[in-house]
Structure formats: C-alpha cells, structure tokens
Image (cartoon, grey):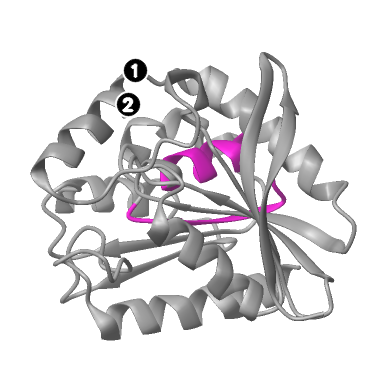
Amino acid sequence: MDLSTQWSTVDGPDGAFDAFLALPRGGRGPALLLLQEIFGVNAHIRAVAEQYAADGYVVLAPDLFWRQGRRLAFGYDEADWGRAAQCMQRADVAQAQADIGAAAAALRATPGAEGRLAALGFCWGGRMAYLALANGHAEHAVAYYGGGIQHCLERADDIRAPLLLHFGARDAHIAPAAVRAIAERFEAREEVEIHLYPDAEHGFNCNHRSSYHQRSAAEAHGHTLLFLSENQ
C-alpha cells in the first residue's frame, strides 16, 4: 500500500475524540504520537504527519482541543492567533495528558504500529510531549520550541528516557534565559539532547508561517530522524 491518511476515533476518559492517522507505505512502522501546536490539527500538523509517514512511521495526531470544538484548526493570521491562544488558555493540561495517554494506547493498538512509542510535539504540543514522557505515556520524546517547559522543570526527575529538544535562538516567545534554565537542569543527563538553531525564530519548522527557516527545519528534521531511529 502507498502512504494513506484518515481520521480515526480514540476512546478517551471523558469521551471519544478524533485523531488524524497517517500510515507509511506498507502500513507498518514505528509508532509516533504527534502533538499539535495551539493551532490544532491543522494543515501544517497533518502535513507533518504525512512527512513522518513518508519517513516510515505510523503517526497519530490527536485532536486535543476537542472539548472546545471538534477538529478545530486555525491558520496564522492575527484573528486565528487570537482564537488559538484562547483555546490554549482554556485547555486543561491534566485533561490533555489523559487524552494523550488514551491516544498513545490507541496508537499502540493500531495494526502496523511497532517498536517503542515516541511523542513528537510542536509549540504547546512540545510541552505536552515533555509531560507525556514524564507521565510515562511515551518511551522517548521530541519537542520543537516547547513553550513553557521551563515552568515544568519540577518534572525533570520524572524524565527517565531519551528526550530531544529543539529551540530557535531568535525565538521571541521562549527567552534565552528559559533555554539556559532547561539546559542547566538537564546538563548532567546524557539521555537529554538539546539543539539551538542560531538563525531560527519560533515556529521555524512550519512552512505555513513567515518564521519558517528552511535550513534550521532541515537540520532539526535530520536530528529528529536520527534520534528516533536510535531509540525505536
């Protein structure tokens, strides 16, 4: 079979919600849980799911804002930024983590999903990936410009598995002091890898945004694929 995509349903602790599933050619591959930005499972996140499916992964991207509206998806203009920010502010992190746990279980049960489950998150989803690893929902994790991780460092001792963090040195949303605090907290942890991209802003991986930086995105994708392959 060629790469295929579809919406599926996850039975969560508070009800059923949707998740976007992307299957690689042949239908089998390592399990990858993809966690959204504040903009929902939008065109960019679905494209990322397809990108990693093309790389050979079975990818599931749960709709984590489902309590506020089914399959909410926003763009990157000023109005959508405001709506997305409201969704993030209204989202309950504990509920989101419970949903992530349910999505991880659903992904593990998906025919063709193999190996050690990885969480991959962007922006708000980067912080959710970090917490998913701390909560035992994933066996390794990758966070791109994970906003708020610096406020969750009390969970650092709960991170007992490989973690890869990507940050942009020009990120106006994550201060250099925040990145330094994270790096210092994990300095002695060989299983935690941090990459800082000197020319990258927030959202540098998203080619739907003006902050997209092709070289940084390419480098980060390469680091991510190597990290995932070494830990799957």
- Residue 42 coordinates in the image, percent (x, y): 41, 51
- Residue 203 coordinates in the image, percent (x, y): 26, 60
Give the residue drawn at x 37%, y 42%: 73
89 and 227: which one is in front?
89
Q: Which residues are magenta?
A: 126-145
Give the residue drawn at x 54%, y 74%: 51
Q: Left or right of 189: which side holds 197?
A: left
The amino acid type of the residue labelled 1 equals: Arg
Numbered disc 1: secondary structure? helix
Look at the image and tell me in which quarter the C terminus lies: bottom right
219 and 176: which one is in front?
219
Visible residue check, residue 9: yes
- Residue 29 lies, with reference to residue 203, above or below; the image says below
Judging by the rendered image, the residue that carries numbered circle 1 is 90
Total marks in image: 2
Give the residue drawn at x 65%, y 72%: 53
Please tell me how crowded label 1 is: few (under 14), some (14-19), or many (20+) other residues with Cα within 10 Å. few
In reply to whether residue 134 is colored magenta, the answer given is: yes
- Residue 228 coordinates in the image, percent (x, y): 64, 70
Give the residue drawn at x 34%, y 40%: 38
- Residue 155 lies, with reference to residue 215, above or below; the image says above
Judging by the rendered image, the residue that carries numbered circle 2 is 87
Look at the image and tell me in which quarter the N terminus lies: bottom right
The amino acid type of the residue labelled 2 equals: Cys
Q: Left or right of 28: which side holds 56?
A: left
In reply to whether residue 109 is colored magenta, the answer given is: no
